[in-house]
Image (spheres, rainbow, N blue to C red):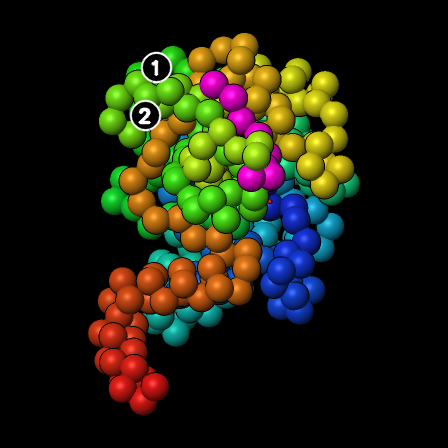
Amino acid sequence: MNVKKAVIPAAGWGTRMLPATKSVPKELLFLAGKPVLQYIVEEAAAAGIEDILIVTNRGKSAIDDYFDYYPELEGRLSAGGHLDELETVRSVADLANLYFVRQKEIRGLGHAILRAKGFVGNEPFAVLLGDDIMRAETPVIGQLIRAAETYSASAVGVQEVSTAALSRYSSVKVRKLEDRIYRAEDMVEKPRPEEAFSNFAILGRYVLTPDIFPILEQTKPGYGGEIQLTDGLKALCKASPMVAVDFEGRRYDTGNLLGHLEATMDFSLDHPETGPWLREYIRKKANEL
Ligand code: G1P
């Protein structure tokens, strides 16, 4: 299975991050030196993805601009001898071939993925949710692609979450195949405690086959009155093989204040320019508390 295409849904309102997201897409919020979305595009590119479709919406054209060349700015940086900054700005536009489509109506994640039908054509493709960033030695989407290839299956990235947290995610019924890899046999979106299959929740990464599109076209609105990707995947995993990959790495939900802060801290601790200073600052603060 050769996965060269990815879809990044990035059409949501960002209500949990208002007022910042009133005019700045939440995917472009700054996180330890670069926007959230850049981490996700870099993860896809590092896993060998060449073509990425970003599903956006009205008020989000700043995303297209961010991944474009900017000759006026680049000219100034070049004339001023700021060659490192020039390289940083320009390389963003060369990470992958980026395509954009608007969701037009906010009708759920499954509906957003349906907008990728024409782009995807007849190939397997990766999905990386625009809020979820990963800190991992091997790109998480690469871990899923490897498992999908091994088992000739589609794949969902899962990790165990607390029973209390399950209702914010989805719960997958699993049967162990090997260390960290399970057969996905059923799933439910935003389960009530009695509906959960296991504590394995899907966390923002998928490898899908185009078989998902006719299923999503028939999927009725589910949780929250929206067309849920999980409801489509529930049908897909019963019709064809799907694996659940308990991926190695830490996932951050940057779509809420605390998740964004955690990611900011951890990525800033890793960053050569800020890490040593932040370590010292945290020690000093801890003594004051
Ligand atoms: C989405 C998915 C859900 C998944 C979650 C975390 O929910 O629908 O299945 O567990 O992302 O990746 P949302 O965060 O959009 O409510």
Judge the density around disc 1: few (<14), some (14-19), many (≥20) Cα neighbours within 10 Å.
Answer: some
- Seen as rendered, the residue at the extreme bottom is 288
Residue at x-position 53% and y-position 33%:
196
Q: Looking at the image, is 145 positioned above or below residue 276?
A: above
In front: 220, or 6? 220
- Would residue 234 be counted in the magenta stretch? no
Report the mark closest to the observer, 1 or 2.
2
Q: Looking at the image, is 266 positioned above or below residue 249?
A: below
**SS class, disc 2:** strand
Residue 151 is tagged as 1
- The residue under label 2 is 181
Residue at x-position 27% and y-position 86%:
287
* Part of the protein shown in magenta: 185-193
Verify CB contact (< 8 Å) between mark 1 and mark 2: yes
Q: Is residue 222 left or right of residue 34?
A: right
Q: Callout 1, which amino acid?
A: Tyr
Percent coordinates x, y for residue 82 in the rendering: 35, 70
Q: Could you tell me how far apart the alpha carbons at marks 1 and 2 are, in whole angstroms?
A: 10 Å
